[in-house]
Image (cartoon, rainbow, N blue to C red):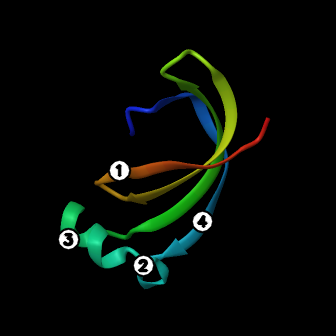
Amino acid sequence: MTEEFQIIGKIESVTTIGVGNRIREIARLRKVYGKGRWRKLKGIALVMFRDGTIRSVELLWYEAHGIGRKKLKIKKYLD
C-alpha cells in the first residue's frame, strides 16, 4: 500500500483485468516480488488521504497468491 492514502473498509466490485502474460509488467513483477499467479485487478473503495479527506475512488493493483497486493494506484475519483 502506498503512503499517500489508506483504504477504509472493503474494496468492492472487484474485477480481473488481466492474468499472467496478459499483464504488461509481468516480467518486472516476477523479478521484484517473485513467481506467482499474477493478476491485475480493479475495484471501488473509500480512501482517506494524508490531509484527512475521504473520497470514493477506482483502484488498480496487482496481486498474487502468497505474495499479496502490490502497486495500488488510484485510477479515477468517483465523487
Q: Is residue 60 above or below residue 18?
A: above
Q: Secondary structure at mark 1?
A: strand
- In front: mark 4 or mark 3? 3
Q: CA distance from mark 1 to mark 4?
A: 15 Å
Name the disc covering residue 31, or none: 3
* Crowd class of label 2 (few under 14; some 14 to 19; many from 20; radius 10 Å): some
Q: Secondary structure at mark 2?
A: helix
Q: Secondary structure at mark 3?
A: helix
Residue type at tag 4: Thr
State the residue lying farthest toward the right: 79
Closer to the camera in the image, 34 or 24: 24
* Crowd class of label 3 (few under 14; some 14 to 19; many from 20; radius 10 Å): few
Name the disc covering residue 49, or none: none
Name the disc covering residue 20, or none: 2
Residue type at tag 3: Lys
Report the residue at 46% width, 48% height from top: 72
The quadrant where residue 60 appears:
bottom right
Q: Is residue 41 left or right of residue 26?
A: right
Q: Is residue 46 left or right of residue 63?
A: right
Counting residues from the start of the chain, the first of labels 1 and 4 encountered is: 4
* Crowd class of label 4 (few under 14; some 14 to 19; many from 20; radius 10 Å): few
Q: CA distance from mark 2 to mark 3?
A: 14 Å
Counting residues from the start of the chain, the first of labels 1 and 3 encountered is: 3
Name the disc covering residue 16, or none: 4
